[in-house]
Image (spheres, helix red, strand yellow):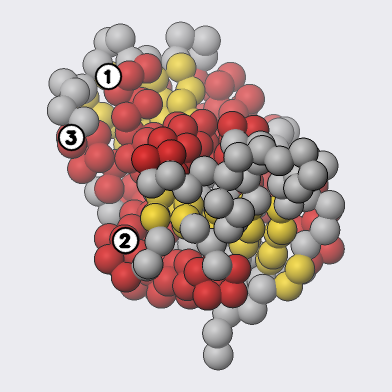
Amino acid sequence: MDRPIGMFDSGFGGLTVARAVIDLLPAENVVYIGDTGRYPYGPRPQDEVRQFARELAWSLVKQHEVKAVVVACNTASAAALDVLQQELPVLVVDVVEPGAKALVKASRSGRVGVIGTVGAIGSGAYERAVASTGADVELTSAACPGFVEFVERGQTSGDEITILAERLLAPIHDAGVDALLLGCTHYPYLARVIGEVMGPDVTLVSSADETAFATRELLDRLDLLRLAAADAPAEHRFYSSGDISWFADLGGRLLGPELGAADHWQPPE
Ligand code: DGL
């Protein structure tokens, strides 16, 4: 099935999920929209994020005829997954549930942590997702305002980020977790700093790979996977609601050579 997989995020973060999907499913065509003109989503009210998510998802369905929508943003998943699953005529995959499953699997002590945006953490989506795994774990969560802004500016290391990370991660550190879920798709770009602050005994879990596995499994179940064809290699298209030359430049550095150019995406009037 040649129809593409659609993905969206508030900006560059979902590229961590796009990378994992492209690596795991190299024959699939991908259309990605980064809503950089309206990022960050984290501090916005849930209703507003839900509306943005609906606009992006419907645009992928109507303009690009995607066969599936991967909500490559934890904040949007937390705010809008239920409505998207209800109203979209295609498969919808989120990042919260695969991340929660991977988190509980990674822990041996049963003390686990999750970090994310103010919106995602405040929504309680992770408490619910971890509880629904049925695992007997104690979850400590912390919002990390400011992390996303560093990534969007192209800054992924340095003293400023380390100082902020030490402050924001202190409650997670003090809880003695042995596994920490990066519950925002931007955070894998800060994994080195987060890993240094948490120390070598804490396993960092990113939802990107798990989401790619979930996407493959669900597409396979519906018989929607695209089989590799030598004469028709996969095509990937990238859109941004903000500055497209910045999107192509930083996006290319973060994702890799598949992101050579970006086109403009505009929210509906
Ligand atoms: N990457 C997004 C997430 O996974 C949100 C970033 C933001 O815009 O605040 O939550």
Q: Is residue 124 visible?
A: yes
Q: Nearer the viewer, mark 1 or mark 2?
A: 2
Residue denoted by label 1: 111
Mark 1 residue element: strand
Q: Nearer the viewer, residue 214 or 179?
A: 214
What kind of residue is marked 2?
Gln
Q: Does residue 78 sit above or below 212 in this rendering?
A: below
Q: Amino acid at mark 3?
A: Ala
Q: Which residue is mark 2?
A: 85
Residue 161 seen in render: no
Q: Whole-percent x and y of residue 161?
A: 63, 37
In the figure, residue 186 lies in which quadrant?
A: top right
223 or 183: nearer the viewer:
223
Please tell me which residue is depicted at 79% across the width and 44% down the height of the picture.
Answer: 231
| Mark 3 touches mark 1? (CB < 8 Å) | no
Residue bearing mark 3: 131
Q: What separation in Å lies between label 3 and label 1 (alpha carbons)? A: 13 Å
The foreground one among 231 and 172 is 231
> Picture coordinates of residue 217 (x, y %)?
41, 36
